[in-house]
Image (cartoon, grey):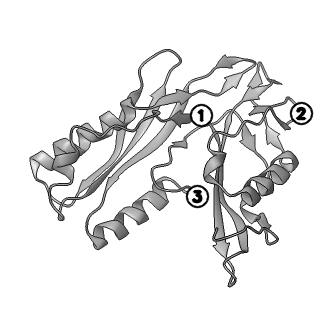
Amino acid sequence: MTITPEGRATDVAWRNFKRMPAPAIAFLERKIPTWRFRPGEVDGVPVATGTSLVIHVVATAKRDRRHFDLDIAGVVTGPSLIGPVIKRRSPQWKVLSGGRSKSGREIVDLLYEPGRPPVMETIEFATSTDHPELVAALAADTLWDVGQWMVRHETLDGLPVPARLRFANVYCYLKEWCDSNRSALADALPGMPPRQPVPLHSEATLLDDVVTLRDTSASATGDP
């Protein structure tokens, strides 16, 4: 979407709305026009800012299983990663899935300069075993995942700006490691689902306290 110099959202285009029930889309279509943003600036002057808005919506079913409450659990503005049309398995997947005791996580920061390959910095690396094969496989798998994505840059007055994102690559086969990974991801990627790349910096800033928004009138035919 584009944020006008006055701070309003325009040109909103949904990327994955087909995964959500119609009432959830209607809920967001009502809310987004009421939100106000701080656009990016050029030489201190607000300009039209292209950005992505990533929204974590939680639906809680009511007793009849035909109605549900909608909550916005997290919202971020900024650049976003675009996945491939067909997800291909990493060459490392057999190593990573070769034993139930093998699990781990790697959290990385990515810097995308327009027109250049990404620069990756590892923020956290942890595995349930120090086996060299697993350690090498997880690191290689993260590089593979990053290589499968392209970045959608923010723009200032039509020109792309560098993108900074944080990405978590997780393999989890034991309950204690699942719990540990969830805790680590909650700290590293606040307010967003696992594996969702989160911008570390955004030219556009959402001013509303959106996590307090709630819609208790949504309904659907069938389970949410």
Mark sitting earlier along the chain (1/2):
2
Mark sitting earlier along the chain (3/2):
2
Image coordinates of residue 179 in percent, x first then y, are 36, 70
* Residue at 29% across, 72% down: 176
Q: Which residue is mark 3?
A: 191
Near mark 3 (Cα within 10 A), the count class, few <14, some 14-19 or many ≥20, is some
Q: Which residue is mark 1?
A: 79
For the C terminus, which image quadrant? bottom right
> How far apart, in angstroms, are the residues tagged by discs 3 and 1?
17 Å
Q: Is residue 168 above or below residue 62?
A: above
Near mark 2 (Cα within 10 A), the count class, few <14, some 14-19 or many ≥20, is few
* Residue at 79% across, 38% down: 38
Secondary structure at numbered mark 1: loop
Where residue 6 is drawn, which disc sits there?
Answer: 2
Mark sitting earlier along the chain (3/1):
1
Residue type, label 2: Glu
